[in-house]
Structures are given as C-alpha cells and as structure tokens.
Image: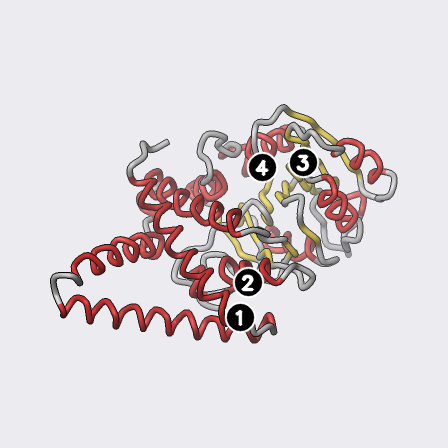
Amino acid sequence: MKKKQFSVSIMIPTYNRAEMLEKALLSLNELDYPKNKYEVIVVNDGSTDNTQEIVKKTAKKVSYKLRYLFQKNKKLSAARNLAIKNSSKEIMVSIDDDMIFPRTWLKKLLKPLKDDKTGAVGGPSIAPKFASFFQRAVDHCMTTSFVGTGGMIGTTKKSFVKYYPRGGNMAVKKSVLDKVGLFDEKFIPAEEIDLDKRIERAGYNLALAKDAVVWHMPRASLKGFLKQIYSRGVMKVQFTRRYKESFEFLYFAPMIGVLGLIFIIVSSFFSKFLFHSFLFLILVYLLILFIDSLIALKRIKDFRVIFIVPFLMFLQHFTYGLGTLAALFKKSQ
C-alpha cells in the first residue's frame, strides 16, 4: 500500500529577477515528487522586467502546474500571503526565486509533517559550488560557520539557540495557517519567526529537516551582505520584544561585544590594565576567527579564505551588533 503524499503549493515571490526565477522553475520540474501533487505559484511583486513572459515561456516546458499572480510592489510577506489565499493544497512551501533544488528535496522537507504534532518545518540553504568565491565566503560566515551563526540556521551539528524555520526553505500545513493566521506584513524583517512562534504557541512542534538542503545564492556584494546582517540584528530585537519568553543571550552577544569594544578602547587610554585586557581579548577573538577560517578552507579549498573569512566575520559580528543596538532605540511594532 502506497503512503499518502501531501498536495503541495510551492510559492515563489519574485521582484525583477526573471533570469534567476527561470532557473528555479526549471529545477523544480526535476523533483522526485508526483507532478499532479504539487503546483508552483509565482507571485510577481510589481516587477518591471520580463518576469511575466519568462513564466509563460517556462510553463510550456514544465510538467507541474505553474500559476502566475501579480501584485503592486507590496514586499515579500504580502506576496506570500497572496499565494496562500489562492491555494487549496494541504501544504504551503515557501522558497526564494534564486534557488536550485536537488531532486529529493521536497520529499525530505515534507517528511516531518507526517507527524500530526508538527506544524512547520525548515531546511538548510547553502551556496552551490558554482557560486563565486566571495559568495561562498559569505555563505560560510552566514550559514555553515558555528562562529557566525551559533547554530541558529540549522546547518551545524551543535546549536546554542532554538531553531526556527526560515521562509527561504520552509513548509507549513495549510490547516495550521488557517488557525494561526498568515505572515504579519508589518512585522518586518521578523515576519518568518513571528509565524513560527504563533505556530508553536498554538501547540505545534517546529521541525528541522537537515537533509532537505537547497542551493541558494548568497549576497554577491559587501554592501548587500552587510545590509542583510544588519537586518538580522534588527529582527532579533523585534522578535524578542514581541515574545519575551524567547530571549536568548546569544542574540545580543554581538551587541555586547560592540559596546565592550568601544568601552575598552576608550578606557585603555586611562588604564594599562584595561589596555592589556583589551589586547588579550582581541588576540583570543582573532585566534577564534583564524581557526574558523581553517575550517572554511577545508570546505571551500581556496587559500584566500584565510584572509577574507576573518575580515567578513568581524564585519558580520560588528554589523549585527549595530543592528540590535539601533533596534533597541526604535519603537516596537
């Protein structure tokens, strides 16, 4: 007797990235999942490029049902919500338009949802080998490094914090969404873990499917990398304000580091002890970053990572800390 397979809507919000979108759509056609059991809903968030034409052209090449929706530029959460409102499937899967998908990805992602107590599940997003050197270095800092993530992304063996599924590789039962509501379109950029928390409060478990990996292109520029990191710092403050019981020290460790660095630098002018303490802490921190760069070298196999990873990791910690610090002075949403 065959096991029951879920009916699935895979939603892809997109904005002016037609070329990347086409690759993602073609990749989804290779999934090892019955074509009559899943559909793909593209939500064009007001693009000015040829997104609509690309979707029409691709629809003729794929075997699954490809649907197209359009909205004026209302951002990511509104696009996801539009897809959810237009779906009657059992499972809503949220992905990004710049991803490539292994054949077995969907089956692996959906497996934990066979448990009635599980409301949502997420999987890791990792840079493909064909990504640029800079992108792979960024991916190490933001995704695969324990020093960079503390384990919160779900890609490391150990974790200091609770895992929450992220919208780039996430599946939620439609029946659960009917109970807890959709993405909060005003709670940006913490809308994904806000939904996770509401699911958890409703009595459901959140799961991590470690083997449900997707290939995702990281930020290709330093500016884009820093902007994303800053937003993550802001997000953690917003999330903790709304759900005070979810406070975890690690979220605020970079901010404490930024304040401590400023304090020690200023104080070192007045105290030799503090100056020497400052030097010792800096040396320990640099040693940790160097060891982490050797771990990156093993994976990326490019000696340049020994120089760029410590630099990017410092910027990541510092920028994240600035984001949390700035968010503390903003009104809660």
> Which callout, 4 or 3, points to the residue nearer the camera?
3
Residue depicted at x 62% and y 33%: 84
- Residue 296 is tagged as 1
Determine crowd level at label 2: few under 14, some 14-19, many 20+ residues with C-alpha closer than 10 A: many
**Helix, strand or loop at disc 4?**
helix
Residue type of the residue flagged with mark 3: Asn
Question: Percent from the top left, x then y, of residue 274?
Answer: 16, 66
Instruction: Point out which mark residue 175 bears.
Output: 4
Location of mark 2 (residue): 137
Instruction: Please tell me whether residue 106 is drawn above or below residue 13 in the rendered image.
Output: below
Q: Which mark is residue 16?
A: 3
Q: CA distance from mark 3 to mark 2?
A: 25 Å
Amino acid type at mark 1: Ala
Give neighbour class at mark 1: few <14, some 14-19, many 20+ (Cα, 10 Å): many
Residue at x-position 84% and y-position 44%: 62
Left or right of 193 on screen, residue 84: right
